[in-house]
């Protein structure tokens, strides 16, 4: 119950601050010129049991969707709550829209937030709850809010206590988006949503990016991050182990090809091509694992008669798991040590 109250009060904090700072904030949807929308420098929150996050440093630029990727318990939610000053850090700093997150509520009034464990009033309908949030925030275009409800098929006329977790998630998404924030912070935003609605949420986030807004989202679903994010930060055991563009991650991912030849395949030429990791011969068919650009491989097979080429999906999961392979035993051992201490 205490955790639910904290999440509910966190959302309320945003709308209350928006009302207080209306005269100081840009008009809804207006994006200011500062390139960096969110930045953390050595941000840390360490609990007495030794768990938490340590020295998290990254930035989210305007016109960008930045994904925090990691398994459950890696530190994604702790990072988000510390960035938004729901949890006070034990070290480091965070800035939102150029303002220290701890020093003033003005920046947070221009932020849309969706917590990972959304708690809503049980008696109200979704429409009543959203209208209440809009009235507190002030300046919300209710026509736009209703359009969002329709877009993601939010069931807003049922009491919230009767809604499934997916339908409650839709209410939270509308609440985060309806005031056209400059910065969106979303913790597992598509949890509980069906594939069609998930796609529509991706389109809404793309729209925020297109108008110059910034999005920080957390996820443990690799295809989701691959679909929507421009850059990704990979979190392992409370530490940010890598920040990469999706293009860079994809360039390192393993691509699997199956090439059929008329006559004897040029195995030796294929093996010498840059990026080729393995070659398997099956009569006139060659199965190849390759990373990076395919230009050298294509030049190697160009003099030969090719009858068929089949390409598999890039194994981005293998690239992601490379940041975790060999660390599972360390994680378990350190967890036991912290428990004993």
Image: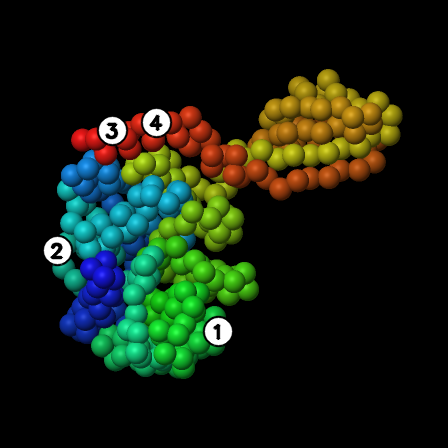
Q: Judge from the rendering whether residue 61 lies leftward or rightward of residue 261; answer left or right.
A: left
- Of badges 1 and 2, nearer the viewer stands 1
Measured in 3D between alpha carbons, the distance from the residue under mark 3 to the one under mark 4, in whole angstroms, is 10 Å
Residue beneath the point at 28% across and 73% down: 121
- x, y percentage for residue 62? 35, 55
Q: CA distance from mark 4 to mark 2?
A: 38 Å
Q: CA distance from mark 1 to mark 2?
A: 38 Å
Q: Measured from the top left, where is residue 2 in percent x and y? A: 20, 60
Q: Locate the C terminus and report the quarter of the image it occupies.
A: top left
Q: Are marks 1 and 3 in contact (CB under 8 Å)?
A: no
Query: Distance from label 1 to label 4 (Cα)?
Result: 44 Å
Pick whichever of labels 3 and 2 is earlier in the sequence: 2
CA neighbours of label 1 inside 10 A, class few (<14), some (14 to 19), many (20+): some
Q: Which mark is residue 103?
A: 2
Where's residue 208, x and y in %? 41, 63
Q: Earlier in the sequence, mark 1 or mark 2?
A: 2
Residue occupied by mark 3? 337
Look at the numbered disc 3 and give the secondary structure of its residue. helix
- Residue 6 or residue 336, whichever sits in front: 336
For label 1, the residue is 153
Q: Which residue is rendered at x = 30% and y = 78% of the image?
A: 123
Residue designated by label 4: 330
């Amino acid at each position: 119950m205490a955790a639910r109250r904290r999440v509910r009060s966190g959302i309320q904090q945003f709308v209350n601050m928006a009302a207080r700072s209306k005269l100081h904030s840009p008009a809804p949807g207006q994006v200011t010129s500062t390139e960096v929308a969110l930045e953390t420098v050595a941000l840390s929150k360490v609990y007495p049991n030794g768990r938490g996050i340590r020295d998290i440093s990254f930035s989210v630029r305007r016109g960008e969707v930045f994904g925090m990727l990691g398994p459950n318990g890696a530190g994604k939610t702790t990072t988000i709550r510390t960035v938004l000053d729901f949890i006070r850090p034990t070290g480091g700093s965070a800035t939102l829209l150029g303002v220290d997150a701890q020093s003033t509520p003005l920046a947070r009034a221009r932020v849309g937030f969706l917590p990972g464990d959304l708690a809503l009033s049980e008696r109200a309908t979704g429409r009543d709850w959203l209208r209440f949030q809009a009235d507190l925030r002030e300046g919300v275009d209710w026509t736009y809010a209703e359009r969002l409800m329709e877009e993601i098929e939010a069931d807003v006329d049922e009491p919230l206590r009767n809604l499934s977790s997916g339908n409650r998630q839709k209410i939270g998404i509308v609440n985060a988006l309806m005031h056209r924030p400059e910065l969106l912070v979303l913790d597992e935003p598509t949890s509980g949503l069906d594939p069609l609605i998930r796609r529509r949420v991706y389109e809404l986030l793309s729209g925020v990016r297109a108008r110059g807004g910034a999005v920080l989202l957390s996820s443990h679903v690799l295809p989701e991050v691959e679909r929507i994010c421009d850059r990704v930060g990979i979190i392992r055991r409370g530490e940010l182990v890598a920040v990469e563009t999706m293009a860079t991650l994809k360039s390192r991912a393993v691509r699997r090809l199956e090439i059929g030849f008329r006559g004897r395949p040029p195995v030796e030429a294929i093996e010498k091509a840059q990026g080729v990791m393995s070659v398997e011969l099956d009569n006139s068919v060659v199965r190849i694992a390759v990373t990076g650009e395919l230009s050298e491989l294509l030049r190697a097979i160009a003099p030969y008669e090719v009858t068929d080429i089949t390409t598999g999906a890039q194994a981005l999961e293998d690239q992601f798991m490379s940041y975790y392979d060999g660390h599972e035993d360390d994680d378990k051992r350190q967890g036991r040590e912290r428990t004993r201490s």
